[in-house]
Amino acid sequence: MNSTKALKLSDFLLSIGANSAVHRRGESLENTVEFTKYAGISWFRLGYESDIETEKLIELHKLTGVMFSYGLASGGSDIPRLIKGAEKLADAGALIALEGPNEPNNWSVKYNGVGGGRNHSWRAVAELQSDLYKTVKNNPKLKNYPVFHIGGESGAQTDNCGLQYLKIPENADTVMPAGTVYADFANVHNYFCHPSVGRLIDNITWHAADPVLETVPGNGGKFDNLYGNYGKMWGGGRFDGYSKSELIDLPRVTTETGVTIGSYNGEVTEDLHGKLIVSMYLSQFKNNYKYTALYILRDRVDEEGNQTFGLFTPQNTPRKAAHYLHNMADILNMNNEVNIIITEELRYTIRNVSETVHELLLQKNKSEFYMILWDERFTGGKDEVEIEFAEIPKNIKIYDVVKGLAPVKSLELKKTLSLNLTDHPVILKISYK
């Protein structure tokens, strides 16, 4: 019988993030407060783009407890401005990290009078990211905060500036010198909807989160994942980065991922959109992404093509994704009980597990575990699994994130139980007290 060390439930909840302009681009602070609380968002990824005021961010933090990663965003290169805003957030206890420029393959930068990114040399991007890192680490207020790498797409480098590394190793044969430090965390935009995949497939959020996946099994498609940006670059240069064994332990975050309703030739309905998003957060955390930011909290009204990504509509109504995420976060955070500092092990066996069934064991309190099981049979079908515990729990409550906050079943002193799994998570609250 397997012995599994539980992860901290609080760490999973803290990983749940989103992109938002907070009070710009059609959003309002009042609605953002409401949406944050309802969906259980713990952090937002943003920057000074669109003149988002740090004072509004601090107000949002005070009202909800939400934290922020603060970055240069699309085309940004003003390090002093970023540092000034980050210092304010740090003083308010609202900062989790700083981030480099967003997607330089789509938005070029100009730094020290030289342009870079897109189809040109990326040296200006590399110098900007390197200088940002040095500036943060030399700042007394900010030196202990992590720096996220450029916002995705290091795999698109036209020249080998070494942006596929956190720190350029010796003998890497890069434009920038060995020893150049860029970041504390790799940063990807591993959207699980990708044109090369072509259609909805099972295990889709799990594959996108896989740190070493080259091509999708049985499909041949690729995701814009960790491997393609920090292992073997996907761009024309196909530069080498970390080995697969190194990628497994590489500190990493995702600052954009998601899917639009209607994707894959209309196969992604609003209901499936919601199920995909809750599964995505679980797959990301299980694959060691410390933070994951969904694109996007609320659909933007000033950006064509981004009208069905959000948890909330442009009319400020919740989609099913918001409801399912609310259910999952609230079930796990029920009663706001004290979180455990050192987690324990639980001995159990799960039988009849197919490749689409995944598990995450979390702990919040002494002798109380939360086992989340999710099946990624998004094209149909089901799995019936059996769970056997080495030590009989006093009580097991079973929750379905699609059905609401109340348990769908409660079992007393059961050593084994069977579950039917399909295309979304179920949560087992396992109590030994």
Image: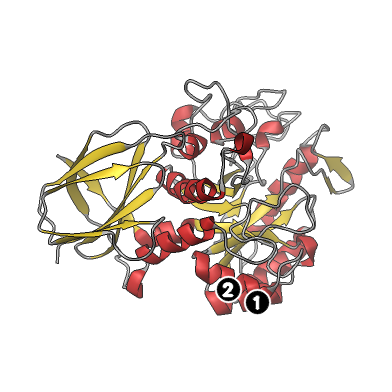
Question: How many badges with numbers are in the image?
Answer: 2
Which mark is on residue 34?
2
The x and y percentages for residue 330 are 40, 66
Name the quarter where the N terminus is drawn.
Answer: top left
Q: SS at mark 2?
A: helix
Residue type of the residue flagged with mark 1: Glu
Which mark is on residue 30?
1
Looking at the picture, tell me which residue is in the foreground, 130 or 229.
229
Looking at the picture, tell me which residue is in the foreground, 414 or 294.
414
Assess whether mark 2 and mark 1 are in contact (beta carbons under 8 angstroms): yes
Looking at the picture, tell me which residue is in the foreground, 271 or 238.
271
Q: Is residue 354 visible?
A: yes
Q: Is residue 65 left or right of residue 308?
A: left
Residue at image position (39%, 56%) is 401
Residue sitting farthest toward the right: 113
Q: Is residue 144 left or right of residue 86?
A: left
- The relative height of residue 356 versus residue 149 in the rendered view (above or below) is above
Q: SS at mark 1?
A: helix
Which mark is on residue 235?
none
- The relative height of residue 219 versus residue 257 in the rendered view (above or below) is above
Residue type of the residue flagged with mark 2: Glu
The x and y percentages for residue 344 are 22, 56
Residue at image position (56%, 45%) is 269
